[in-house]
Amino acid sequence: MERGKVKKEKGKEPEKEKNRGKGKEEKGKGKEVEEKIKEKGNGKEVEEKIKEKGKENGKEKKGKRKEDNHKERETEKEQFKGKEEEEKDNSILVKPLLEPPEINNHILVLGLDGAGKTSVLHSLALNRVQHSDAPTQGFNAVCINTEDSQMEFLEIGGSEPFRSYWEMYVSRGILLIFVVDSADHNRLPEAKKHLHQLTETNPIIPLVVFANKQDLEAAYHITDIHEALALSEVGNDRTMFLFGTQVTENGSEIPSTMQDAKDLIAHLAADMQ
């Protein structure tokens, strides 16, 4: 009987071993689960790091965009400043005066209204074509600098109210530039009358005639302008020159004839001062 008990007890030992084995397996599984949880936790950390990195990249992109926008704004400011300075230069270039300035030694720019005096004067001053559509209502004082000298120009409006000032200023001027519209045939006799009156007022003043708007189809050739203005009667002892001029494409370089006229005017003005 005792032996049988022993056998039974021995028979129970394998079950305990099995239970122990199961416990070990469960512990092993628990460890695996813990490791998986840790791995999941690491996954969250990695995900958070990726998010943080994405945010940093986003900040960098935003910063770069801000920097690019700032550069664009600065460029726009510079461009606007350049335009503003150019407009400022142009406003300084020609100063409309309603009251006549003090009589002084000027290079006078005269001619009938619509002849293109202001456009010619702007182009000479800037060395590029600069149109002016508005008629001169008064006086324009313009200073043109060259390599060797500084020239003071005075343009007087060509409409009827301002022509009374022409003779007053031509008597003290050092050089007369007279501008005519080569295509306005009907007004050439009127231009001739005023030109001859001016030359009689000052018999020694050098004369430079601009036969302007030569680009127009109806324009008279300079030889026709010479006859229409009777320039041969102005005086053989007077220094006199006739140029065919035109101001076509706005912003383009002035024609070579205008550059030649500018150089000649500078030379004549230097001799008279």
Image: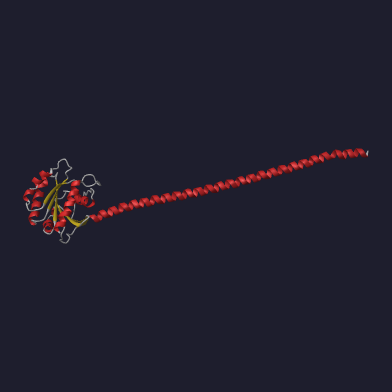
Q: Position of residue 123 (x, y in %)?
A: 21, 50
48 to the left or right of 189:
right
State the residue in front, 105 or 86. 105
Residue extending farthest to the bottom is 102
Q: Position of residue 197 (x, y in %)?
A: 8, 54
Image quadrant in which the N terminus is located: top right
Q: Position of residue 159 (x, y in %)?
A: 14, 52
Q: Which residue occupies 35% across, 52% down? A: 78
38 to the left or right of 104:
right
Whether residue 50 is visible: yes
Q: Count the marks: how many?
A: 0
Q: Position of residue 241 (x, y in %)?
A: 12, 50
Rendering quarter of residue 31: top right
Whether residue 134 is visible: no
Rendering quarter of residue 152: bottom left
Residue extending farthest to the right is 1
Q: Which residue occupies 75% across, 42% down? A: 24
